[in-house]
DNA sequence: GTGAAAATGGGAACGAGTATCATTGCTGTT
DNA sequence: AACAGCAATGATACTCGTTCCCATTTTCAC
């Protein structure tokens, strides 16, 4: 893997925010630094970064993927009104994982938890 | 909501299997009963059934949605090699939900857990 | 039955993401 | 510093699951 300018810019962008952005948003930000960067490159870099474990790819229930430049054992809660995503500690422990393995016979390698609800601001907004 | 033949056929199909089928598979099955049913209708009916809580819509990590005609408080485990999906009891309890609400300030209305791993058959297949 | 509203069928349109390929530009070597 | 090799890029065409549109059909309350 080569350390290209595009890769560094995308990684910086995705690490500089906690808004769990879409690929399109990352693309718009990246164009401010490299005006002719292509969307394909943004997707390619994000995919590569995910394989390397430097980025998490999220599913917010819409068709678009969202990206999180702060990987680690945390999960996400998504506002059903405004789409805002916040971080949540992982509530699934090793014991639960072992129970699932025994019940299903599957060899578990990962899990993902998504919470849905209303963020504090949308609760006030009626 | 009107009780149309198309609606009844789609509901019967999605309830008659535990394979968590794609919309396309449901469409193929439905055409055996109503040869000129349209794919758009299958999508519309599945969406309506989901709103009514009669069907769950799943995300297996690919572009395709999968549907489960047996809703209720269970979650899913997806084979990373063959895509097979099995049911899993929900490991998230009320206490965890309340903890998440307090930590985030979100008003939680739902959660989703996906497990990933290898199904028993794919473990044998090397 | 009748009429109004809802659902359907068929096909066009949409759009997030992927593939293609000629060109660019890293990086290790001399 | 030039070189060579090959991974990465930019531009764009393409894929394909899903949604939209609208004329026609069907359901259902009366």
Image (tube, coloured by chain):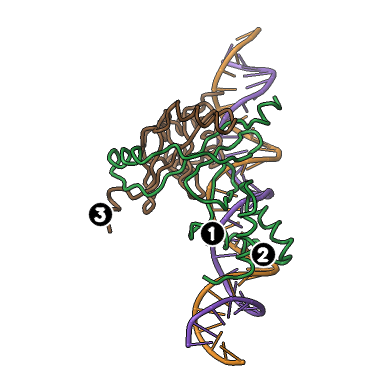
Chain colours: A brown, B green, C orange, D purple
- Does mark 2 fall on the same chain as mark 3? no
x, y percent for residue A60: 45, 45
Residue B38: mark in rendering: 2
Q: Which residue is mark 3?
A: A124
Chain of the residue under label 3: A
Residue at the disc numbered 1: B47
B43, A39: nearer the viewer: B43
Task: Give coordinates of residue B1: x percent, y percent.
Answer: 51, 70
Q: Do pointers 1 and 2 mark residues of a single chain? A: yes
Question: Circle 1: is it few (<14), some (14-19), or many (20+) Cα within 10 Å?
Answer: some
Q: Quick check: A110 above or below B29?
A: above
- Find the distance from the CA under tag 1 to the CA under tag 2: 14 Å
Q: Are marks 1 and 3 on the same chain?
A: no
Tell me the residue at 46%/43% (across/down).
B112
Q: At numbered mark 3, what does the secondary structure look like: helix, strand or loop?
A: helix
Whether residue C12 is situated above or below residue B86 in the rendered picture: below
Q: Residue furthest front?
A: A103
Q: CA gap, disc 3 to disc 2?
A: 43 Å
**Towards the viewer: A68 or A117:** A117
SS of the residue at dot 2? loop
């Amino acid at each position: 893997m080569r350390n290209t300018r595009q890769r560094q810019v995308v990684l910086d962008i995705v690490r500089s925010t906690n808004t769990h952005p879409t690929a399109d948003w990352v693309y718009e930000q990246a164009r401010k630094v490299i005006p002719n960067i292509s969307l394909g490159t943004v997707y390619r870099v994000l995919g590569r970064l995910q394989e390397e474990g430097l980025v998490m790819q999220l599913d917010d229930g819409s068709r678009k993927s969202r990206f999180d430049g702060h990987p680690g054992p945390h999960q996400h809660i998504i506002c059903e009104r405004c789409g805002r995503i916040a971080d949540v500690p992982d509530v699934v422990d090793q014991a639960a994982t072992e129970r699932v393995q025994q019940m299903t016979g599957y060899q578990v390698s990962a899990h993902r938890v998504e919470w849905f609800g209303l963020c504090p601001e949308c609760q006030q907004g009626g």
